[in-house]
């Protein structure tokens, strides 16, 4: 309670000292966000999408490929599509440690997922410890932490591990992405809740999330969803 009041006070102070500024166009921010109303309205928000892979569809449902070959994810939600300006904000957060961009993206994720069926816990997709050392922070965890706090969900950090140092997916084609991630994750520790949602920054082919979901299922998780900041259409 004291901690909550202190956090609110610090937040009010930081707003007074550093008024929000749009990270996209530099105009004054709106609604306490580092985003102006015009840029918020222009965000690439998915309308209808496949329930199992979040690929945009003309109307909500399950896409052909997911019907033919059901993925290991029960439901995938994407807050945004990976298009301008999200394709600049996410790399700023991931590669340049832009904390304001991370905060903004986590806030947009919380708003987008507030109405989703609630999992019992959020599980961030982990980096391998070598990549974590190199980068200095874990971008999925940096999104998942404020998201869990805003939605009042437990965060299971440190239970899912990347046991192989995989090459960056961004440098590979779709087939190589699947091979790259095969067996890359393992779960450590005791029982996990029956229903969790993985959290990652981007979903492109889904190979990363699928490998992580398979590891969670092997560990006894019954339902695995994924909540990503952006889906590459
Ligand atoms: O859906 P997919 O095709 O698997 O691609 C998405 C993954 O690729 C990116 O990470 P990447 O492995 O490039 O980099 P990182 O390990 O440095 O975070 C991204 O952060 C996702 O985790």
Image (cartoon, rainbow, N blue to C red):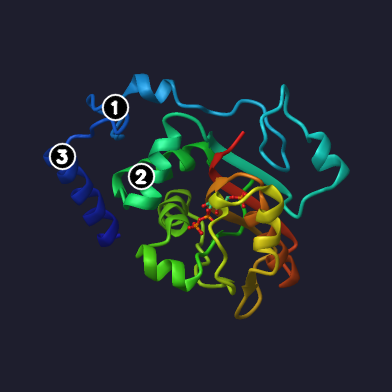
Label drawn at residue 30: 1
Label drawn at residue 92: 2
Q: Is residue 215 above or below residue 78?
A: below
Q: Which residue is mark 3?
A: 18
On-image quarter of the C terminus? top right
Return the residue nearer the eye: 14 or 160: 160
Q: Is residue 204 above or below residue 178?
A: above
Does dot 1 land on a helix, a strand or a loop?
loop
Find residue 171 and report its horizontal and vertical position in percent: 55, 51
Q: Residue at x 77, y 32 (%)?
A: 61
Label 1 close to label 2 by CB (< 8 Å)? no
Find residue 131 and report its horizontal and vertical position in percent: 45, 67
Quadrant of residue 187 in the image?
A: bottom right
Q: Earlier in the sequence, mark 1 or mark 2?
A: 1
Q: Is residue 74 left or right of residue 103?
A: right
Quadrant of residue 12 in the image?
A: top left
Is residue 116 visible in this depiction of the protein?
Answer: no
Q: Is residue 119 above or below residue 228?
A: below
Q: Residue at x 71, y 27 (%)?
A: 57
Q: Is residue 183 left or right of residue 232?
A: right
Q: Is residue 185 left or right of residue 87?
A: right
Q: Foreground mark, 1 or 2? A: 2
Find residue 85 and report its horizontal and vertical position in percent: 41, 30
Q: Residues within 10 Å of mark 1 (few under 14, many from 20)?
A: some
Return the residue nearer the eye: 209 or 41: 209
Disc 3/disc 2 C-alpha distance (Å)? 20 Å
Find residue 72 and report its horizontal and vertical position in percent: 76, 55
Q: Residues within 10 Å of mark 3 (few under 14, many from 20)?
A: few
């Amino acid at each position: 309670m004291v901690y909550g009041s202190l956090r609110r006070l610090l937040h009010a102070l930081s707003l007074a000292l550093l008024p929000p500024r749009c990270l996209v166009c530099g105009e004054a921010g709106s609604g306490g966000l580092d985003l102006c109303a015009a840029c918020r309205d222009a965000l690439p928000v998915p309308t209808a999408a496949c329930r199992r892979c979040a690929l945009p569809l003309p109307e909500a449902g399950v896409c052909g490929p997911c019907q033919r070959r059901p993925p290991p994810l029960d439901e995938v939600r994407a807050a945004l599509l990976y298009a301008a300006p999200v394709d600049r904000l996410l790399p700023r957060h991931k590669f340049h440690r832009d904390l304001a961009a991370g905060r903004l993206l986590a806030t947009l994720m919380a708003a987008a997922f507030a109405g989703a069926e609630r999992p019992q816990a959020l599980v961030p997709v982990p980096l391998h410890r070598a990549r974590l050392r190199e980068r200095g922070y874990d971008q999925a965890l940096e999104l998942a932490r404020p998201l869990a706090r805003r939605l009042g969900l437990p965060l299971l950090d440190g239970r899912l591990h990347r046991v192989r140092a995989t090459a960056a997916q961004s440098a590979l084609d779709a087939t190589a992405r699947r091979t790259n991630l095969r067996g890359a994750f393992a779960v450590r520790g005791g029982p996990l809740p029956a229903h969790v949602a993985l959290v990652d920054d981007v979903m492109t082919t889904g190979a990363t999330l699928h490998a992580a979901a398979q590891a969670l299922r092997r560990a006894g998780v019954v339902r695995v969803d994924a909540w990503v900041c952006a889906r590459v259409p």
